Amino acid sequence: MHVTIANSQMKKVKMHMLVEIHRPKTSGKIRKVAHPQKVAKSFENFRFYIKYAGFVLRALRNPRFQKFLKWIMRREEIEENIVKDVQVRVFPFRKENGNGLAGRCKNKSRIFIYPKRFESCQKLTRKYGKDKTLSYIEYRAQAALIHEFLHVKYASDEEKVRKLTKKYFNMFIENSENTHAISRMLFRE
């Protein structure tokens, strides 16, 4: 069987293929990053942080989550190509006030996702158990990525970004087990 495609149709097919090739998917932009100067400081917990970052990387690349993130971006009219790089940092980031940071958007083109401190994860595990702590880590990273993508559009409106993050994240976990407990842990209701 031989199929003939008109010239105009062939051009459309080629253009679609070019757009798909040059438009990297969000999950393809996500990578794990560790800075050597921090390795020496946190050597005793290095294995923990490497495992944490790998776990977060898988959570952010999860096809169901990626599909939901694309839906948010379409709904909020955020161009997927505007963010060039999403880095899952191996080590935590502490702000000047001493608080930890879950994520950060830099120049609208780079997003950083940070882990909780080793000690904080130990406390969570003692209080809630391993399974709930792992769920918390996964959902914390996903909520942070949603939050930072919303900052691309609403750069300085932190209140609006927090409100939308909570709304979208709760939609994402709506049918999950322990939905309310997870939401309370993340958003401290």
Image (cartoon, rainbow, N blue to C red):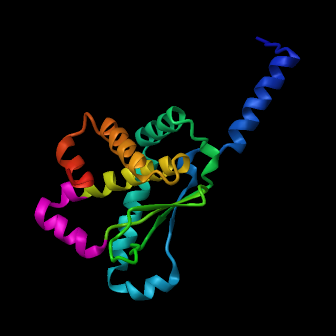
Up the image or down, 19 lies above or below 165; here it is above
Where is residue 79 drawn, in percent x and y? Answer: 61, 41
Above or below residue 44? Residue 21 is above
| Res 37 seen here | yes
Q: Identify the residue shown where x is 40% and y is 87%.
A: 41
Q: Please tell me which residue lies in front, 73 or 47.
A: 73
In the rendered structure, which segment of residues is drawn in magenta? Answer: 117-133
Asked where in the image residue 128 lies, by quadrant, the reply is bottom left
Q: Where is residue 107? Give x, y as percent.
A: 60, 60
Image-based side of 96 in relation to 1, left or right: left
Picture residue at 46% right of the left edge, 50% below the top: 157
28 above or below 113?
A: above
In the rendered structure, the answer to whether residue 98 lies left or right of residue 82 reads left
Q: Nearer the viewer, residue 28 or 87?
A: 87
Residue that appears at 79% across and 13% down: 3
Q: Position of residue 179 (x, y in %)?
A: 21, 41
Q: Residue furthest right?
A: 7
Q: Quadrant of the N terminus?
A: top right
Residue extending farthest to the bottom is 40
Asked if residue 93 lies in the magenta stretch, the reply is no
Residue 24, given in percent of the width and then of the height, sits at 64, 46
Residue 122 colored in magenta in the image: yes
The one of 153 and 169 positioned closer to us in this rendering: 153
Q: Is residue 150 left or right of residue 85?
A: left
